[in-house]
């Protein structure tokens, strides 16, 4: 699965898991990774989100690759697995951010029971391109949440 430029995004996620700050999820098909996400146990780093939803684990970085495999249930399976893991750790709320430029993902999350709380923030991150230049990104997002109380798991 690709990671932009020289950024070792998947390796960094695995390293975060080794420190017990996250759980890195990988969906496999015939021995090939086709989807990833990460549960950030300390929640979203954006202050606007942390103030409104303190202690709420965040499902972050959900992706399915290659694009031809999207809309086949892989993302939904990753989300369901994340919800089960969050519930088993004793949390009754899970959240995730969705980029304003990704209406397809937003539709999936809303269909799966996530609620728009009118919690807006900038998702800030950086990456190194193939030449080693650092790029800073600030994507406008909204934070969606889902109550997990009473669900089977």
Image: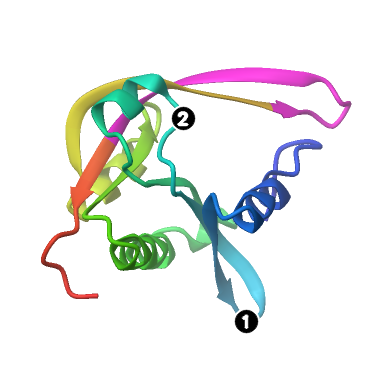
Q: Earlier in the sequence, mark 2 or mark 1?
A: 1
Disc 1: CA contacts within 10 A as few (<14), some (14-19) or many (>=20) = few
Q: Is residue 146 left or right of residue 30?
A: left
Q: Is residue 59 above or below residue 75?
A: above
Pinpoint residue 98: horizontal percent, then vertical percent.
36, 35
Image quarter of residue 78: bottom left
Which residue does the image show at 30% across and 21% down from the upper left? 120
For residue 128: magenta?
yes
> How many discs appear?
2
Image quarter of residue 135: top right
Pinpoint residue 11: horizontal percent, then vertical percent.
72, 51
* Residue carrying label 2: 45
* Real-space Cα separation, disc 2 to disc 1, in angstroms: 35 Å
Disc 2: CA contacts within 10 A as few (<14), some (14-19) or many (>=20) = few
Discs 2/1, front: 2
* Residue carrying label 1: 30
Q: Secondary structure at mark 2?
A: loop
- Location of the C terminus by quadrant is bottom left
Q: Is residue 99 left or right of residue 118?
A: right
What are the residue bounds of the magenta stretch?
127-143
Which residue does the image show at 58% across and 65% down from the upper left? 34
For residue 34: magenta?
no
Colour convention: rainbow
């Amino acid at each position: 699965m690709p990671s932009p430029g020289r950024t070792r995004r998947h390796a960094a996620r695995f390293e975060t898991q080794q420190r017990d700050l996250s759980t890195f999820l990988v969906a496999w098909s015939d021995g090939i990774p086709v989807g990833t996400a990460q549960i950030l146990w300390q929640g979203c780093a954006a202050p606007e989100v942390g103030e409104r939803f303190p202690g709420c684990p965040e499902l972050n970085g959900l992706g399915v690759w290659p694009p031809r495999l999207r809309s086949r249930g892989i993302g939904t399976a990753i989300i369901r697995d994340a919800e089960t893991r969050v519930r088993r750790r004793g949390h009754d709320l899970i959240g995730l951010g969705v980029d304003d430029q990704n209406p397809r993902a937003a539709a999936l999350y809303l269909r799966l029971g996530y609620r728009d709380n009118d919690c807006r923030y900038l998702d800030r991150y950086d990456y190194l391109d193939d030449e080693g230049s650092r790029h800073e990104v600030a994507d406008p997002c909204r934070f969606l949440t889902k109550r997990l109380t009473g669900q089977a798991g």
